[in-house]
Amino acid sequence: MRKRTKQLVSVIAAAGLIGVTLTGCASDSSASNASASGGTSGASSDIEKAALATYVPFGQKDKYYMFASGGHSGQVYVVGVPSMRRIRTIPVFTPDPGSGYGFDDKTKAMLDGFHWGDVHHPALSETNGKYDGRWLFVNDNANNRAAMIDLKTFTTEQVTKPIPNISGPHCAAFVTPNSEYFMMPTRFSVPPNFKYSPLTDYDKKYSGMMAAMKIDPKTGHMNLGWELQLPPWDYDLSDEGKGPSNGWAFITTYNTEEATTNLEVNASQKDRDYTVMVNWKAAAKAAADPKNTYELNGAKVLDPTKVPGLIYLLPTPKSPHGVDVSPDGKYIVASGKLSPTVTVFSFDKIQKAIDNKDFAGMDHGLPILKFNDIKEAEVNVGLGPLHTQFDGKGYAYTTLFIDSAIVKWKLGDWKVVDKIGVNYAPGHSAASMGDSAVPDGKYLVSLNKIAKDDFLPVGPSHPVAMQLIDISGPKMKLLYTAPIDEEPHYAQIAPADLFHPINVYPKDTSNPAAIYNPKQAKVVRNGNKVEIWMTAIRSHFTPDNIQVNEGDQVTIHLTNLDRDESIAHGFAIESYDINEIVEPGQTKTFTFTAKKAGVYPFYCTNFCSALHQEMQGYLLVKPS
Ligand code: CUK
Ligand code: CUA
């Protein structure tokens, strides 16, 4: 141990991270154990400790995966924690020639002509309220879709078609504790399916909607189960109940004023909007009975005013943004972004208020609970509270957008105990295991919105910053600041040992597109359709000369015969705007029209061997 620590310290020193020699002994690489001597001052020793706590020496791996949304890049970033190194970008809603995503027939059909998505809230699949490492679900806030990433391959396996009747499923933020559903509540209220209606009809023709995407427990694929009609407000975030509140979902609204213009003023009029509390288990049951639902653009829709008990409204100050349920499921924490407090509701009190039927009134036919009956506390956190995470040790961590800080406060006595500045303006933060029922209280990553001065300048637009904070002790400690592309809104962090990705695609002799021997390579012509079964192996394509006629529709089934890990081959055709990548053992099918007559070299784009450059061939397109 001593030897390893010395080695790593000298590596850090050599890299110029610190300018001193350390003689202390750290039993592992955590900040609290790292010790420095040699007369260094407090400040530099904090830097040394932080460096040690985040440095992952060559040959070792990070302890956690972080899955961060890529915002309007449409992708998902995989980051190692604590090193904060970006390991992979998983293409989801945006084509990616680096992996061939969006170029082959399957993923092209998944993208369905769209060029991007707006990913805000990744949600790992759960079993009994704990991350189970199988799938990651994300929303597309821009085109009303959901996607599923299979964590066996770290690739997107499903992108749904746009879901009817919802508009901007920004609130899609969680899966239910046994991965029954990925919930996609709407952000913008619109007339269902965007049907034209003047804004003067807003209160009659416009509505919100929560789409319940049923998750297949075997494959992780989603199907629209049912929808729940919501009042014509704008909705923001949501979270799942746990423990005693399991079966409920909590969704914030920020425009109960029903404004349609100048929302920055007009949607900030009321002292309180709502947290909309939905009994999704009861809704799922009610939706199974056809007498409770109506058909709308192919969806089965529940009207909550017809089935009492599905929705209660919790008055929530002041244009709330985030809503987060404590790991024990007892408290619901809502952040009013225009109020310097977070409001904590007690699920126990909510249940009593519901049992007593003691309502403050109705709004759009839905019962409003009395604020003072259900409020547990208002915690004075500071300016611009947005989102809260938990450490499993009784503390909560709330991001303050305006104060550019994170505050730590105690559940139960509702006092702020610590505050740390971040650089700048945090949106969400993500705690290790933070959304599960069992957060482990090790790390918190602040996902900052507006980074300044942190990195080498790269033009007017600065990379945004993710800041790693050690939350294992009584005081938060800032460990590291890492740049990233646009724009992680949210992330989930889970221990690395939960994930067991494959190295090589298994042989699938039942797949008609796959061949596992170059001798089986063939070209089959059927009218003007040409189908080619091709293999790639270091360093040869079979066949490597392809003859077609101008105008032919060409389909290539390409199988990578290499079965060594990380030996991927590419397949690009000059001037044809095509690049495909086949991972070891993988078969992909792609189709194009041979529009341009002539001779076009094709080649492997992925450096695969010493003879990678020789891995090439010709597409000869005979003029018609
Ligand atoms: S949002 Cu971006 S900071 Cu889309 Cu979850 Cu709150
Ligand atoms: Cu195959 Cu480069």
Image (spheres, rainbow, N blue to C red):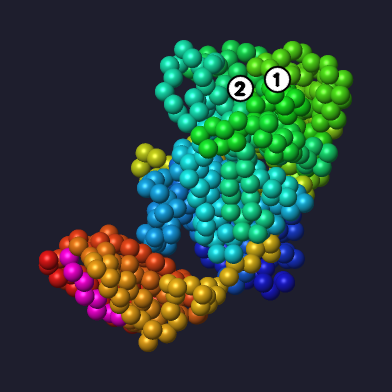
Residue type, numbered disc 2: Pro
Q: What crowding class fits label 2: few (fewer than 14 Cα within 10 Å), some (14-19), or many (20 or more)?
A: many
Between discs 2 and 1, the one toward the N terminus? 2
Q: Is residue 581 left or right of residue 361?
A: left
Quarter of the image containing the N terminus? bottom right
> Toward the viewer: 553 or 444?
553
**Predominant SS along the magenta part:** strand
What residue do we see at 55% from left, 64% from top? Answer: 153
Task: Please give the count of numbered marks on the rendered protein.
Answer: 2
Asked which secondary structure carries label 2, the reply is loop
Q: Is residue 493 left or right of residue 205?
A: right
> Toward the viewer: 242 or 506?
506
What residue do we see at 49% from left, 24% from top? Answer: 191
- Highlighted magenta segment, given as a residue range: 543-550
Residue receiving disc 1: 366
Up-down relation of residue 162 to residue 60 (above or below): above
Which label sits on residue 231?
2
Is residue 395 something one can see in this rendering?
A: no
Q: Where does the image place residue 550, in percent across and percent down from the top left?
A: 17, 65
- Report the residue that reaches farthest toward the front: 291
